[in-house]
Amino acid sequence: MDWMMILKAFVVGGAICVIGQILIDKTKLTPARILVAYVTIGAILGGLGLYKYLIDFAGCGATVPLTGFGSLLAKGTISEVQTTGFIGAFTGGIKAAAGGISAAIFFGYIASLVSKPKIKKQ
Amino acid sequence: MKKVGNQSYILNKPVNIAATASIVGPKEKEGPLHQFFDQCLEDEFWGESSWEKAESKLVKEAVSMAISKSGIASSNIDFCFAGDLLNQCIASSFGLRETNIPFIGLFGACSTFVESMIMASALIDGDFATNTICTASSHFCSAEKQFRFPLELGNQRPPSSQWTVTGSGAAILTKDGTGPFITSFTPGKIVDMGIKDANNMGAAMAGAAEDTLVRHLTDTGREPNYYDVILTGDLGYIGKDILIDLVSSKGYNIKDIYNDCGVLMFYKEKQDTHSGGSGCGCIATVFSGFVYQMLQEKKYKKVLMIATGALMNSTSTQQGESIPGIAHAISIEVL
């Protein structure tokens, strides 16, 4: 097992979350806006080809947070445009992210069948 | 009833508070006031299939408990004033649909409980009613869904946010009785401080609380120390500090006799509600449980209750509107 990779994923993924926490605590940004900002930043960095360096360095530490989803949208769009042309701008992003989106819907549905919402602790 | 000053009223014959009832949720049970409540729930659903149904049950049970404590037959109750935080006040109307008491639904956000007592007092003082019931409720889980995000989203609450109290308080107001008595009230004006953050309602409502408090003191010619205690509900920690500053800039020192129901409801460190409690149910249960008992035991003899409300909804927040605040004051005395 690559312990160094696990450590790097933990530090980078954690750092991305720390930034989100600081934004919640110190700014008036709502969680929804922070979420959209993360996806957008990820898409811009992915589109510029910069986010892949972070993925190479930290693996899941960079792909699992929302910025990773954004970069995946950009990457999928670019490669689809290259293969199918202009229409790829509309199909590529969702195609690339289809696995994650479908899994979220499927597992969310399963979870809703077997569990009941609860009050939060704080 | 006679009007004094700009917007305060002194009742010709003080209105009696015959009985109160309070039911709260599990988190409130862990708070410092738990021994004053009539009933504390073990879980937020209370055996129901939704939080909205649980809140309706809170209203229904608190009202029937208050009625049975007062010994007045429900057929002899002329009006029921009730309100809550859900769309179109369904917690109240669904909870009370089987009571067979003439029902007047109110919305004053978290100020609803005192708003209902003002309406009831005015009707009783004017001989339009003999016995009335006033109630207000809120539920943390249904309020989060209504005003912020559904709990299933699992998002975090920012440090300035307040914790909506799960609970319902009810009070029976009657023409005759031995007290405690409602002696005067000051209905508030809408005050907008330009705050747009739905997670910082204490700051949004502090201006309204200041306006009503200063107006009440000026109209009645009283100093703050006329009262044993001045209680707002619910500015929380942030709004409480703002109110003390705002009022001191008007030349009144309320620091020693002032507190807030949202501050009283929970332990600050241990329960970590961030800026304290809020919701219609907060001042309703703190009054019906704690304050009413203090008045009965004559530990408090003169209390000024100022209920504050943030008059926004989720659409106005999404459209970037500021939050108008309201505060209604009512003075309750042991005579």
Image (spheres, rainbow, N blue to C red):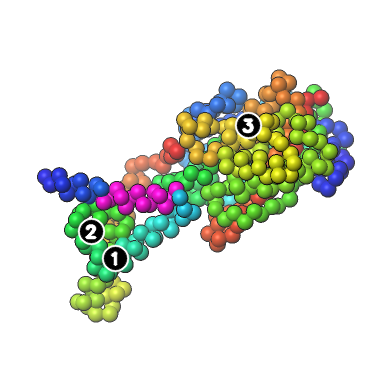
Left or right: residue B322 compared with residue B155: right
As drawn, A6 above or below B319:
above
Q: Are marks 1 and 3 in contact (CB under 8 Å)?
A: no
Which x, y percent locates residue B290?
64, 27
Question: Residue extending furthest left?
Answer: A1
Give me the C-alpha separation between circle 2 and circle 1: 10 Å
First in sequence: mark 2 vs mark 1: 1
Q: Chain of mark 1?
A: A
Question: Any magenta on residue B226?
Answer: no
Q: Which residue is mark 3?
A: B286
Q: Residue at x 73, y 28 (%)?
A: B228
User: Is residue B325 among what the camera can see?
Assistant: yes
Question: What amino acid does circle 3 point to?
Answer: Val
Q: Are marks 2 and 1 in contact (CB under 8 Å)?
A: yes
Give me the C-alpha separation between circle 1 and circle 3: 52 Å
Q: Are marks 2 and 3 in contact (CB under 8 Å)?
A: no
Question: What amino acid does circle 1 point to?
Answer: Leu
Question: Any magenta on residue A17?
Answer: yes
Viewer-nearest residue: B223 or B3: B223
Label ID, residue A54: 2
Give the magenta range: A12-25
Question: Residue extending furthest top?
Answer: B297
